[in-house]
Image: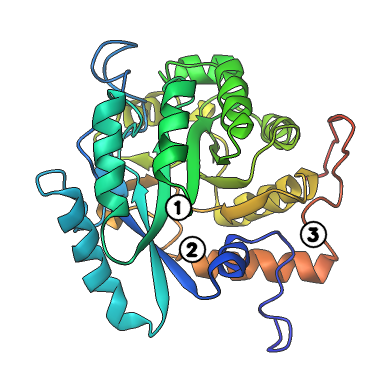
Amino acid sequence: MTEQNKNILPWNDYSSYIKSIFGVRVQKISVDAGFTCPNRDGSKGHGACIYCTNESFSPFYCNSEISVTEQLQKGIDFFSPKYKTQKYLAYFQSYTNTYGSVDTLKKTYAEALNTQGVEGLVIATRPDCINAEILEMIKEISANKYLSIEFGAESTIDRTLDFINRGHNWQQTIDAVNLTNSFGINCGLHFIIGLPGETEEDFYTHAGRISKLPVKTLKIHQMQVLKGTRLEEIYSNKPELIFDLNLENYIRVIINFLELLNPGIIVERFTSESPKNLIIYPDWKGKKNFEISHIVANKMSEAGSYQGKKYSCNKYQAIHIQP
């Protein structure tokens, strides 16, 4: 990519979007507020999702044994020397961050918003753990602040959601997105490419179904088989269930996915990083998110590809894409 066009990406990128709001760089500071999940504590199930281990994405300052304020301050102290000008969002990332009483949630979010330098909230949760009362409270205490709620949808296919022990179905995701949108709150979705049993055509079906919803942002990333998860056992015993996630193949799928995606949806990421010592599959030799993004951008630019190139605003039609 040339110097002239290196900042112009062929997808609707999150960095540009968030900078257009704040005018400067914005850093999310992850927070672990000590919540759990309904498929961990028995209300929906036990054992969590088959791929889940929070060790894979929790930074050092994200620790529920210290207060929300302390976690945020540690994060700000870590990032502030790196950039002269930036603002911060409190990112409630670990587990299900609307899974609690309204009073508890209100106190937790208010503590974050009262931390100096924090300009808003990003709340990660499940689509079956949201309701009008919670949304009304969040909107009220976040007045004049940035606010986004991210739902871990992971798949649009119910048989997959059952298999991975997710504990909710696709219709619940649709309902949660529509309800959140009705409150005028930014809504994001999280999806995993390569879940056991899913085919390439399934991934493109996801793109079409997501495109029909009033979604502001989207995070997609590769499925990762991590040590100590139930997915590790499945990968060992039934490797035929796992899609070919070598890097070249994954990049090809991501480009096709982006071409089918509603161009109005802001793409926050399409890869994820976990500690090397936990990763069993796929092994991408330690490539970072920004490196893979550069490869995707170059390949799309060379091919004249861009987000939404094959998007139909009327309804999704399965488009067979040559491998």
Q: Which residue shows up at 20% across the image and 49% down it?
A: 68
Where does label 2 land, which residue? 289
Which element is circle 2 on? Answer: helix
**Residue occupying the far bottom of the picture:** 3
Residue nearest the viewer, comparing 219 with 319: 219
Q: Which numbered circle lies on residue 272?
A: 1
Q: Which residue shows up at 55% across the image and 74% down it?
A: 23
- Between the C-alphas of marks 2 and 3, the distance is 19 Å
Q: Is residue 111 above or below residue 184?
A: below
Kind of residue at badge 1:
Ser
What is the x, y in percent for residue 107? 24, 38
Q: Please state, as top left, top right, bottom left or bottom right, where the C terminus lies in the image.
A: top right
Where does label 3 land, which residue? 306
Q: Taking the image as drawn, is residue 43 in sight? A: yes
Crowding at mark 1 (Cα within 10 Å: few <14, some 14-19, many 20+): some
Which element is circle 1 on? Answer: loop
What is the x, y in percent for residue 189? 55, 38
Q: Is residue 127 above or below residue 77?
A: above
Residue nearest the viewer, comparing 302 with 105: 105
Q: Earlier in the sequence, mark 1 or mark 2?
A: 1
